Image (cartoon, rainbow, N blue to C red):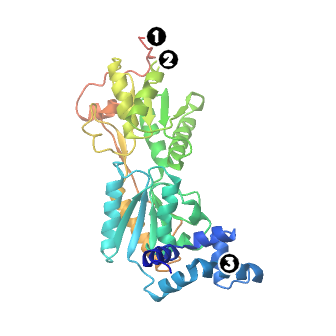
């Protein structure tokens, strides 16, 4: 006789079976399971029968039918972030919440912490129906969802685009923003401009690097352009990169940083080595970190409308779930270029302060 507790454990195990589990047992893709159980002629009768038997034996069919008898809506949206502690995420999530609260829909936030296993586990909320839709802030589509194209109309990426044209995207034009930032430095007479970039595999950082290269090419300085892709884009990475730069004999006269935190670290090291900012090296960051205006000197940066991105992203997802087919693949919101003291001349002149930098004079590293 089976113990009641054991029966309960078996029941819970069978109830937790998902389409992905059935696919693994059958040795096929989840999309094939979906087609087979819906009776699609695209799947051979033999395969349909085998998948149906596995689904019945595993308890998936019963569980699936039970879900279908309930409301098809969970009234919950899942938001996947790479790191819950990142300063940029709270504003985006606030915008998401504001849009969803108007429709009495809740928000679940899950952090992947860089783990693919956590991505897959979080993605199952959408597959099992415990979430009606998914908002990605991590720039990655969980691998199991990539095998299930029927879910693409329930997913929106914010800030970081997904390498899948079927996934709607809400963000800014990072390439254009980098062009504008580089052109601003050029307008100040800076010509030896280096770009301190983030990870090369990130579409955001590759777009910013491309914008920098385009601006340097347009200025006839393509041969003098230099992009340093770093593995991280935090303060420590900026400090380490700047130490390497300061080991050279000839220094850049401006550095475009792919994040404000990179700029913070780089400026700290420059000042530790008695490099004058902005007189000898000007800096521009990206993101408008809450500290950027209070930093010394105040950091020139690109301000990203994070809260508006979250709001529009959530609205877009609700429209997709509602069957709206007229939504563009990419929606780009305007950013704001904030000129501050870390670049010098124009900022100083606007405040009646003396501009002491002369770009015609090459700067030789006094430590070399």
Direction from residue 181 to residue 264 in the image, left or right: left
Q: Measure how far apart labels 3 and 1 are at the Cα level.
A: 70 Å
Nearest the eye: 149 or 44: 44
User: Reading the chain from its start, which is encountered first: label 2 or label 1?
Assistant: 2
**Residue 248 marker:** 2
Q: Is residue 233 above or below residue 252?
A: below
Q: Tag 1, which secondary structure?
A: loop
Q: Is residue 202 visible?
A: yes
Q: Is residue 275 above or below residue 198?
A: above
CB contact under 8 Å: marks 3 and 2: no
The 10 Å Cα crowd at callout 1, few under 14, some 14 to 19, many 20 or more, is few
Nearest the eye: 45 or 255: 45
Residue bearing mark 3 = 51
Residue 182 x, y percent position in the rendering: 46, 38
User: Reading the chain from its start, which is encountered first: label 3 or label 1?
Assistant: 3
Direction from residue 343 to residue 323 in the image, left or right: right
Q: Is residue 55 above or below residue 79?
A: below
CB contact under 8 Å: marks 2 and 1: yes
Q: Measure how far apart labels 3 and 2 are at the Cα level.
A: 64 Å
Q: Is residue 188 visible?
A: no
Residue bearing mark 1 = 368
Q: Residue at x 47, y 43 (%)?
A: 178
Q: Tag 3, which secondary structure?
A: helix
């Amino acid at each position: 006789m089976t113990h009641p507790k054991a029966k309960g454990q078996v029941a819970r195990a069978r109830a937790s079976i998902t389409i992905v589990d059935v696919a693994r047992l059958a040795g096929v893709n989840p999309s094939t399971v979906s087609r087979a159980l819906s009776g699609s002629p695209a799947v051979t009768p033999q395969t349909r029968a085998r998948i149906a038997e596995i689904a019945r034996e595993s308890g998936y069919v019963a569980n699936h039918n039970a879900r279908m008898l309930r409301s098809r809506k969970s009234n919950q949206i899942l938001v996947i972030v790479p790191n819950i502690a990142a300063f940029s995420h709270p504003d985006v999530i606030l915008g998401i919440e504001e849009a969803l609260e108007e429709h009495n829909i809740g928000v679940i936030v899950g952090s992947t912490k860089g783990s693919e296993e956590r991505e897959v586990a979080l993605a199952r909320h959408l597959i099992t129906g415990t979430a009606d839709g998914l908002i990605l802030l991590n720039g990655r589509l969980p691998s199991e969802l990539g095998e299930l194209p029927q879910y693409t109309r329930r997913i929106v990426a914010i800030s970081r685009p997904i390498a899948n044209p079927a996934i709607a995207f809400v963000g800014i034009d990072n390439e254009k923003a980098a062009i504008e930032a580089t052109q601003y430095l050029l307008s100040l007479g800076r010509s030896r401009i280096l770009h301190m970039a983030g990870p090369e595999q990130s579409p955001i950082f590759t777009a910013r690097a491309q914008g920098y290269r385009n601006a340097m090419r347009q200025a006839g300085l393509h041969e003098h352009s230099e992009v340093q892709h770093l593995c991280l884009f935090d303060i420590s990475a900026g400090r380490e990169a700047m130490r390497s730069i300061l080991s050279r004999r000839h220094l850049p006269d401006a550095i475009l940083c792919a994040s404000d935190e990179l700029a913070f670290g780089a400026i700290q090291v420059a000042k530790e080595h008695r490099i004058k900012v902005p007189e000898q090296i000007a800096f521009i960051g990206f993101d408008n970190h809450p500290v950027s205006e209070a930093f010394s000197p105040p950091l020139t940066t690109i301000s990203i409308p994070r809260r508006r991105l979250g709001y529009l992203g959530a609205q877009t997802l609700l429209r997709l779930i509602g069957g709206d087919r007229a939504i563009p693949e990419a929606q780009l919101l305007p950013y704001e270029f904030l000129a501050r003291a870390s670049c010098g001349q124009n900022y100083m002149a606007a405040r009646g302060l003396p501009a002491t930098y002369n770009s015609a004079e090459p700067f030789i590293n006094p430590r070399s």
